[in-house]
Image (cartoon, coloured by chain):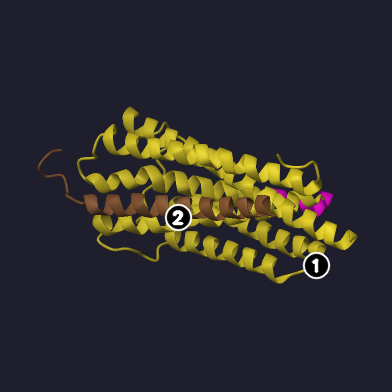
Chain colours: A brown, B yellow
Amino acid sequence: MPPETPQNGEYLVAAYVITAAILMGYWVRLWSRVKGVRGK
Amino acid sequence: MIPASPEGDALRVAQRGIWISAVALVALAGVFVLALAFTPVEARQGLAQKIFYLHVPAAWAALLAFSLVGIASVLYLWLKDPRLDRFAAASAEVGVVFSAVMLTTGPIWAKPIWGTWWTWDARLTLTLFVFFLFVGYLALRAAVHDAAERARFSAVVGILGMLLVPFVHLSVYLFRTLHPQPIVLKPSAPSLPPEMLTTLLVSTLVFTVLYVGLVTARYGLVLVDEAREAARDAA
């Protein structure tokens, strides 16, 4: 990385973590509903 | 083993969707590795530029979802096929989830690059408006209990939402805006180095498969609810 490149890795980490949390969270919600139906 | 019954068939659809989306989520972890370890750092924006590999595919998936809600809604009003209404409901919910990704990753990129989390320019404002419109669509579906009425009312809202999608895409041409111009979906050739373009296209493919999986799972769960209601009514 050239020395003049901005140092802003914390924003990258935040965006990747939040994306994973939203998508995994929704998937887990659907999965737990499917599991709940199977259990009945 | 799931017994053969309407509820069992619906559950199989939902499980298929869960499996497809699970595979897509594993592939998304691969996209993270590809973007972070094997794609060059952009010199002017630094590491924050790599947010682009999630933000753009999430925007693609959200606008695809909302466009398909509109198309299914038009077809529903014409054909009155309940499968179209179920699909529209599933696609709207998944579209709202992808919009949430788009609307959070966008400001996180904007803060270090623009110096502000948010600005009320045409692209951002229209995108937020479409998000709220489809949250309203889901609220409307939850509030109306008669199935035929619910399908008809929500189809109208779904079509209105779809009509906004081209304005979201074209807003960067129609208005003065801070938001970057399209770099792939534009009349001339994509203006990205090949390694960055490859990562973007792989990520877009993974988000599209994830959309298919999540919509299939959600559709299956709507079918399960309907099968249960039908069984209760028959009893």
Residue at left 34%, top 28%? B194
Using the image, determine if residue B135 lies above or below residue B16: below
Which image quarter is the N terminus of chain B in?
top right
Left of B34 or right of it: where is B158? right
Asked whether, in this view, residue B40 is left or right of residue B31, the answer is left
Q: Is residue B78 magenta?
A: yes
Which chain is indicated by disc 2? Answer: A
Q: Residues within 10 Å of mark 1 (few under 14, many from 20)?
A: few
Query: From this viewpoint, which residue is outermost toward the right?
Result: B234
Label 1, label 2: how far apart the Cα atoms are: 31 Å
Say which residue appears at 54% left-offset and 49% top-offset: B63
Q: Element under label 2?
A: helix
Hey, which residue is sitting farthest top in the picture?
B194
Q: Which residues are magenta?
A: B71-80
Q: Which three-letter amino acid code belongs to the residue tagged 1? A: Asp
User: Three-letter amino acid code at disc 2?
Assistant: Ile
Tell me the residue at 58%/46% (across/down): B214
Is B28 displayed left or right of B107 in the figure? right
The answer to whether one can see residue B186 in this image is no
The disc at residue B146 is 1
Q: How many marks?
A: 2
Q: Position of residue A5 (x, y in %)?
A: 15, 44
Residue placed most toward the observer, B100 or B72: B100
Displayed quadrant of residue B8: top right
Q: What residue lies at 36% left-to-right and 45% top-to-bottom? A: B52
